[in-house]
Amino acid sequence: MDPQAPRTENPAGGPMYQAPVPAPTYAGPGGAPGQPDIVKRGIAAFIDFAIIGAANAFMTLVLSIALGWIGAMVAAAVATALVLGRDIVIENRSLGKKLLGLAVVRADGSPITLQESIRRNATLAIGTAVGILGAVPLLGLLAIPLYLVAAAVGFYEIYLVASSKPRLGDNLAGGTRVVFQGQPAIAF
């Protein structure tokens, strides 16, 4: 018997009944049930972007050798597509979210679609999209201020998550949010 579960005596003198224990409710820094904390979200994002970054570096190297600056553009375009669709890759989650037991859902709790993932991650894909322009000789110089804009937007998104506020991307996608869902593969 679970020592934390309430016990009830059977009035007829029969065996004791153990009331079921409710499932744990998770609360994030803002105290909202089901909201994961910034550390878990940060680790999930780090896993996702480390994989996308490694794939982008490998593709850029190989395609640049084979195709020159056009190969670098193709690699940046593929990396942009990976960032935009990252929230539905594995069972409607990113790899980082899957490993940490997180998922992105709509306001009603249903899974997001590819279109919502694209809108949600548009703010995070600015940097990789600028990489397409950055690969073009001479025009790539125009990418420098755009990379600064991408960094500013990324830092603002981190600030919003740390403040337990919806990300710009969540608002663009119609009110999506990150919640605990399933058993994490990595325990913290």
Image (cartoon, grey):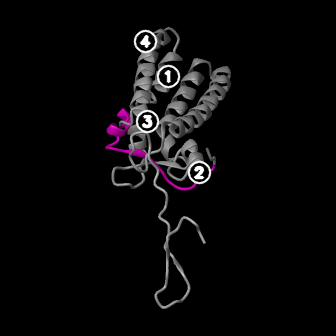
Left/right of residue 185 with respect to residue 11 in the rendered view: right
Distance Cα–Cα, label 1 vs label 2 = 35 Å
* Mark 3, other Cα within 10 Å: few <14 / some 14–19 / many ≥20: many
Q: Specify whether 16 is left or right of 65.
A: left
Q: CA distance from mark 4 to mark 1?
A: 14 Å
Residue range (magenta): 166-185
CA separation in Å, label 3 and label 4: 20 Å
Q: Secondary structure at mark 1?
A: helix
User: x%, y% of residue 95?
Assistant: 58, 44
Would you say residue 172 sits in the magenta stretch? Answer: yes
Residue highlighted by disc 4:
145
Mark 2: which amino acid?
Pro
User: Along the line of sight, which residue is nearer the eye, 59 or 164?
Assistant: 164
Query: Do we see residue 136 in this rendering?
Result: yes
Look at label 3 and name its amino acid: Asn
Q: What amino acid does circle 4 point to?
A: Pro
Residues packed near mark 4 inside 10 Å, few (<14), some (14 to 19) or many (20 plus): few
* Residue 115 appears in the rendering: no
Quarter location, residue 164: top left
Of the two numbered discs 2 and 4 in the rendering, the one whose residue sits closer to the viewer: 2
Q: Image point 38% across, 46% down: which residue? A: 32
The location of residue 55, given as percent across then percent down, is 63, 32
The residue carrying mark 2 is: 184
Circle nearer the N terminus (1, 3): 3
* Residue wearing tag 1: 132
- Across the whole image, how many numbered discs are drawn on residues? 4
- Judging by the rendered image, the residue that carries numbered circle 3 is 121
Q: Residue furthest bottom?
A: 12
Q: How far is disc 2 from disc 3 in space, using C-alphas?
A: 23 Å
